[in-house]
Amino acid sequence: MALLEILHHPDARLRKKAAPVQQIDARITQLVADMFETMYAAHGIGLAATQINVHERVVVIDLSEEKTEPLCLINAEIISKEGKMEHEEGCLSVPEYYEKVERAERIQVRALDTAGKTFEMDADGLLAVCIQHELDHLDGKLFVDYLSSLKQQRVRKKLEKLKKQQPKSPASGAAA
């Protein structure tokens, strides 16, 4: 397994739409394992492949405190939504920033698991929020896109400040 680099907003690669996974093979199962390892190391509860610069429709989630309930969604689609709720969200690609976002309270999702088997599940509360948040990543959308333009400016300024405070590694000499 390997720790992967998580892209940070405003990296343009976060805006790229992910393609469906064509075949679930050893490469995809390794990707899923690496994504879980990366998410756990970053203390996250969800990670979309887009966030690690892999533009395929793969999402991993684990809401458990003990990190013992991994959920992988491949080629997931939301097939129904109900209700509305506001929940404070954060994101591994938008470090140290949290804001309330309105999303559907309950959803039904259809996806493939790592064995290539189709399944459907109902989700509500935090799991529903997390799934919607991660699937947005696969469509090139970030939770900050739901915010007012003023709040989006604040996010950008905060991230620029954080970036300036980080020590530069020898490999990061040129700006992207």
Image (spheres, rainbow, N blue to C red):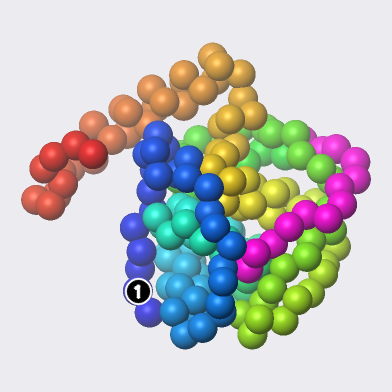
Label 1, residues with CA under 10 Å away: few <14, some 14-19, many ≥20:
few
**In the picture, residue 112 is in which quadrant?**
bottom right
Q: Is residue 75 above or below residue 6?
A: below
The residue sitting at 81% across, 43% down in the picture is 104
Quick check: is 10 in the magenta stretch? no
The residue sitting at 48% across, 40% down in the picture is 15
Identify the image quadrant of the N terminus: bottom left
Residue 147 locus on image (x, y percent): 62, 25
**In the picture, residue 48 is in which quadrant?**
bottom right
Quick check: is 84 in the magenta stretch? yes
Residue 133 locus on image (x, y percent): 64, 47
Residue 122 seen in the current view: yes
**In the picture, residue 111 is in which quadrant?**
bottom right
Dominant secondary structure (helix, strand or loop) of the stretch shown in magenta: strand
Viewer-closest of 117 and 34: 117
Viewer-closest of 96 and 28: 28
Residue at the far front in the pictured view:
22
Residue at the far top in the pictured view:
150
Residue 167 locus on image (x, y percent): 18, 42
* Number of dots carrying numbers: 1
Would residue 73 be found to the left or right of residue 128 on screen?
left
Would residue 173 be found to the left or right of residue 102 on screen?
left
Residue identified by numbered label 1: 2
Would residue 171 be found to the left or right of residue 142 on screen?
left
The residue sitting at 58% across, 30% down in the picture is 145
Would residue 135 be found to the left or right of residue 55 on screen?
right
Viewer-closest of 150 and 121: 121
The range drawn in magenta is 74-86
